[in-house]
Amino acid sequence: MKYLLSILFIVLSSISFTAQLTMDVGGTYKYHGTYQVDKENLFITYQNFWTMTTNTPHVFQGDCSGIIKFKSGNQVNDIMCHGKNKDAYWHASFNDIAKGELGAATSGFTIVSAKGPFEELIGQKCMGAYIELEDQHYIWKGVCNIPDKTFERILNYIPNKN
């Protein structure tokens, strides 16, 4: 019986996070300041403006700002993003060690607040990939593995009409 319950738990766990919310972003960025503190520590202030489509009916526009830190060869992002669409919004925090290099990297992010279709995603950890293009343009792709039921609710979200 214990063996059967263990197998059932593993199967149900693997099924519960089968949907993927994808986010495709394009926008412009700017480095406002570069501070070389010493030979191992570089800090760059960063800001971007973007538009985002998802694999749902929901689209957003927004901006991000923060600091990109290079400490002993590791890139650490400390960036906050805000997306909005009418009354809906969400905030995401990029505060993980990035893999790659400045201009082309992957990094985790967490949705820290939301109102509207992404409200159930508060606390959700996701992954994103960033590539800088010419003339201070960039593209970014984010993926959140979420339960099927949550994805269904996001797909079918209808804002309250007050």
Image: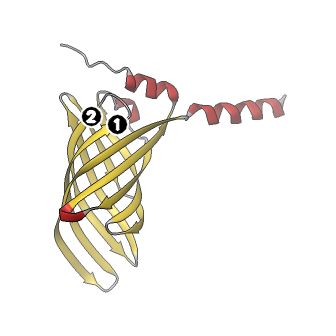
Instruction: Where is residue 144? Give x, y as percent.
Output: 44, 42
The quadrant in which the C terminus is found is top left
Query: Closer to the camera, 145 or 23?
Result: 23
Label 2 Cα crowd, 10 Å radius (few <14 / some 14-19 / many 20+): some
The secondary element bearing badge 1 is classed as strand
- Name the residue: 66% across, 30% down: 12
The image shows residue 62 at horizontal and vertical percentages of 20, 44
In the image, residue 110 lies at what x, y percent? 38, 47
Residue under circle 1?
54
> Farthest residue toward the left?
32
Judged left or right of residue 158, residue 137 is left
Front one among 122 and 55: 55
Specify whether 74 is left or right of 133: right
Q: Residue at x 40, y 77 (%)?
A: 73
Left or right: 141 as drawn, with respect to 10: left
Query: Which amino acid type is marked by label 2?
Result: Val
Quadrant housing the N terminus: top right
Image point 29% across, 47% down: which residue?
Answer: 25
Q: CA distance from mark 1 to mark 2?
A: 6 Å
| Label disc, if present, on residue 59 of the rendered structure | 2
Residue 105, disc: none
Amino acid, disc 1:
Thr
